[in-house]
Image: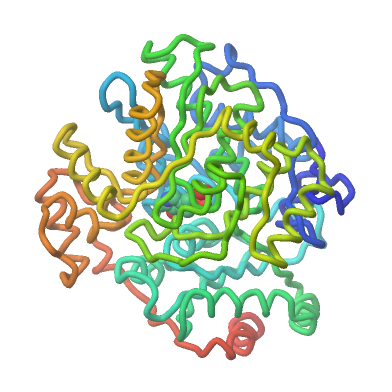
Amino acid sequence: MKYISTRGNFNPAVSAAAIRLGMVPGGGLFVPETFPAAQLEEWASLSYRDLAVEIFSRYLTDFSREELQNYVNAAYSSDRFDSDRVVPFTDLGDQLTVMELWHGPTAAFKDVALQLLPHLLTAALKKEGHGRDAVILVATSGDTGKAALEGFKDIEGTHIVVFYPENGVSAVQEKQMVTTGGSNTHVVAVTGNFDDCQTMVKQIFADDQFNQRLWDNGLEFSSANSINWGRLVPQIVYYFYAYFDQVRKGRIQNGDPLNFCVPTGNFGNILAGYYAQRMGLPVHKFICASNRNKVLTDFFADGVYDRQREFYRTASPSMDILISSNLERYLFEMAGRDAEQVRSWYDQLEETGRFQVSESIREQMSELFYAGFADESETAAQIKAVFEQYNYLMDTHTAVGMRVYRQYVEATGDTTVTVLDSTASPFKFNRAVTGAVTGKDVSDRDEFALLDELQQFSGVPVHRALNGLQQLKAVTPQVIDSSDGSRLLAEILFD
Ligand SMILES: *Cc1c(COP(=O)(O)O)cnc(C)c1O
């Protein structure tokens, strides 16, 4: 299997090259040349790990089956995921199942991909690079930083440095990051906001002199962000796994279609579902759920992608995104793999902040996708309603999905069984969740006290990744100005 560029500007590359590079050097994203065919009958009874090996071995053909098996065993071991099944399900009534993607070490769905990526990346550097150690830089507004730290912690041949805005993450998120431990992890606070962090990291990546210095010291930069193929491919697995779960329970027959409802930010998670469908997974509809930052809802409605709009901070911050970078891969398919067309759209986006697809493409998009959004009060009301009806606690991101699922059912009357992707533990966003279920104003309460209070109120135990966090040994992160990034990085890496 080879990987080609969505903008037609790179020779077909093996998967190790795509993973090592992260994105196409001249702009564009790596996509598989074809979609391998799923084996619905043969795969139906496999464990999560065995299913993962089957799917990876079809996409990552330059890795041996034994390599893939080893990475899967290490990434999805029972001490990393607290459910033996890796991804467990909770049925809410006959037509809806919640797929809990947050049983990994940091309580967020990004663990599913970021536990595997370090193994793929270090192997890719050995195959494609020159055996240099990888330096991973991450700018984070909270969740990704911790998931990346846990994924790369003590992985030989890697160093990871996470930058976060000094006053821009929650107390729990900061505590999670500074208690990671590991000999190759570094956490740095930057004065300024998330954008300052992100810009600083991009500048360091692009600094030729710094890159040369790394090279001379046996190191090279690499990226763990969500456009890396090595982060997308692990997410395809759980769409199949959810399908077979419903078949096993007799809620559908093997071959019947399912719906998937996905709370969406960068369009990575839902794209992985679409790739599963292209491999042959029977899907009736993908329901794409956004929060108030509804750039995708508008795009599916009128075919205009317009990022020039007000940006809102919401209680589902991991979906506060106006540039959904993985959408490019989906548009490549919608354009009939016309790379010139994709390039033209993205040139327009860069120059004018918007682009428009043709009416026939817009119609084609709506055959398989339904898009909607939920505002802040609808999201909070949904958390409360689900808790009262099912005694089930969901986080703010999942609740956005739940609300849009209900809109969809109201609008269409569709009774197809639906899987709702649950992307974070409710304890991870405990302030908003406690406020929603108790109806109290908890906006100035201590977040750690709220963990206990939510547990008491709901009877649901605190996620182990967040339990006892306050007692863990913490490092005191350095606080730097955003102009000081490369100096500090040199100190970390070369001294
Ligand atoms: C990252 C994230 C999302 C959005 O996922 P995308 O792949 O970017 O669409 C949703 N919920 C949570 C909790 C996340 O961390």
Residue drawn 76% across the image and 61% down it: 347
Q: By what rule are the colours in the image chosen? A: rainbow
Task: Say which quadrant the C terminus sits in.
Answer: bottom right
Q: Is residue 327 left or right of residue 214?
A: left
Across and down, in percent, residue 308 comes to: 56, 65
Q: Quadrant of residue 24?
A: bottom right
Looking at the image, which is closer to me, 37 or 345? Answer: 345
Residue drawn 33% across the image and 69% down it: 170
Res 412 visible: yes
Residue drawn 49% across the image and 45% down it: 112
Res 74 visible: no
Across and down, in percent, residue 242 comes to: 45, 27
Task: Say which quadrant the N terminus sits in.
Answer: top right
Q: Is residue 234 left or right of residue 417?
A: right
Query: Where 309 sits versus 211, above or below?
Result: above
Label total for image? 0
Query: Where 2 sits versus 485, above or below?
Result: above
Looking at the image, which is closer to me, 170 or 49? Answer: 170
Query: Where 125 sits versus 39, above or below?
Result: below
Across and down, in percent, residue 414 comes to: 40, 21
Across and down, in percent, residue 199 comes to: 60, 77
Q: Residue furthest right?
A: 11
Residue drawn 38% across the image and 45% down it: 102
Looking at the image, which is closer to me, 60 or 385? Answer: 385
Q: Is residue 425 left or right of residue 300?
A: left
